[in-house]
Every structure is written in structure tokens, then in C-alpha cells.
Amino acid sequence: MFGWFGKISFVPFSKVQDFAVHLKDGRLMGSVCKGCGYATFPPRADCPQCLAGEFDFREIGGRGKLYTWTRISAAPTGFEDVVPYTLGVVDLEEGGRLVAWIGDTIPEGEIRIGMGVQVVPRMMEEREEIKVYYTIEKPGTTWGKAPPSG
Ligand SMILES: [Zn+2]
């Protein structure tokens, strides 16, 4: 089911594959290491701090600050149809740093490094197979679309 994640999943199976199932239901799940308590988002099955391989999922709120951003004009394979697009890097309040598309609620002219942002689960509605991802939006933006049943 990790094959659901992203426009193209280059990693169809992962120890954290339930992450994509939770994302479909509108939940952002980070991980907490059972060995040392290290918390991160996106989830990591193997702890970068103590190298333990056991973890629990923990839901996060998704608030953070924009660390940096860029506009992609030369797309990698599989993204040619959506170019140009903007990507941001977010430092989360609850720990972790992620890369995601900057969503429609933040026009490029309003992007400021250090601004408060909200990470929001998304589904690619134009696709027939399940594809889930998340975007960087203005604070207060919520997962507003009911996910499909099943
Ligand atoms: Zn650890």
C-alpha cells in the first residue's frame, strides 16, 4: 500500500507502508522510536539516532515553519505534466522536516521563508488508482474532502 504514496512511488513496499493508509483517512502519522523516543515525520522505520528498528506511529498536527522553497521548472521523470511547480521544506513543531508541494492556498508571491504553514493530507482526484500525498498550505487549512470508503 505504500505504492499509493505520491504521484509516483519509487518504493512500493516499506516498513512504514501503513503511513499511506492513514494518509488516505486524513491523518498525518509520524514515528516514535521504541528504543529512544526519537520522533520524526515522515515516519522512519529505523531510528537515525539509536538505530533501533522498532517504532510506533504517532499522529501529528502538521503545523510548522517554512524552512525554504524552490520552483521546479525542469521536472524529473513522471512529473513533466505538472511542471512548473513549487516545493517547500517545512520544520514541524512536533519534530521532523519534510519536503512537499506548496498548495493552492499559498500563491507563489506570498511565500516567505519562516512563515507559519499547515501540512494537509491530499488525494490525487484525477487518478483512478489510489494516490495520496500531502501539501503545504496556509495555517488553518484542513483536510476537507471525505476520503472514499474502502
Ligand atoms: Zn531511537
Image (tube, rainbow, N blue to C red):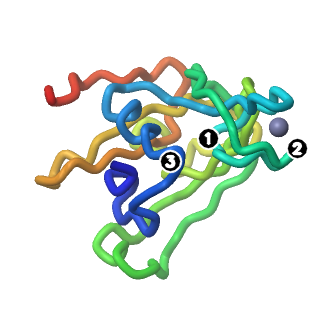
Q: Secondary structure at mark 3?
A: strand
- Amino acid at the residue labelled 2: Cys
Q: Position of residue 82 (x, y in %)?
A: 33, 67
Left or right of 65, for residue 11: left
Judging depth in this view, the residue of 133 and 1 nearest the camera is: 1
Q: Which residue is mark 1?
A: 43
Up-down: is 12 above or below 77?
above
Q: Quarter of the picture for ligand 1? A: top right
The answer to which of marks 1 and 2 sits earlier in the sequence is: 1
The answer to which of marks 2 and 3 sits earlier in the sequence is: 2
Judging depth in this view, the residue of 34 and 141 nearest the camera is: 34
Residue at 73%, 24% in the rendered image: 94
Q: Residues within 10 Å of mark 2 (few under 14, many from 20)?
A: few
Spatial CA distance of label 1 from label 2 is 15 Å
Judging depth in this view, the residue of 143 and 1 nearest the camera is: 1
| Quadrant hosting residue 149 | top left
- Ligand 1 within 8 Å, label 3 CB: no
Q: Nearer the viewer, mark 1 or mark 2?
A: 2
Q: Position of residue 138 (x, y in %)?
A: 52, 29
- Amino acid at the residue labelled 3: Ile
- Ligand 1 within 8 Å, label 2 CB: yes
Q: Which residue is mark 2?
A: 50
Which numbered marker is on residue 102? Answer: 3
Residue at 66%, 33% in the rendered image: 55
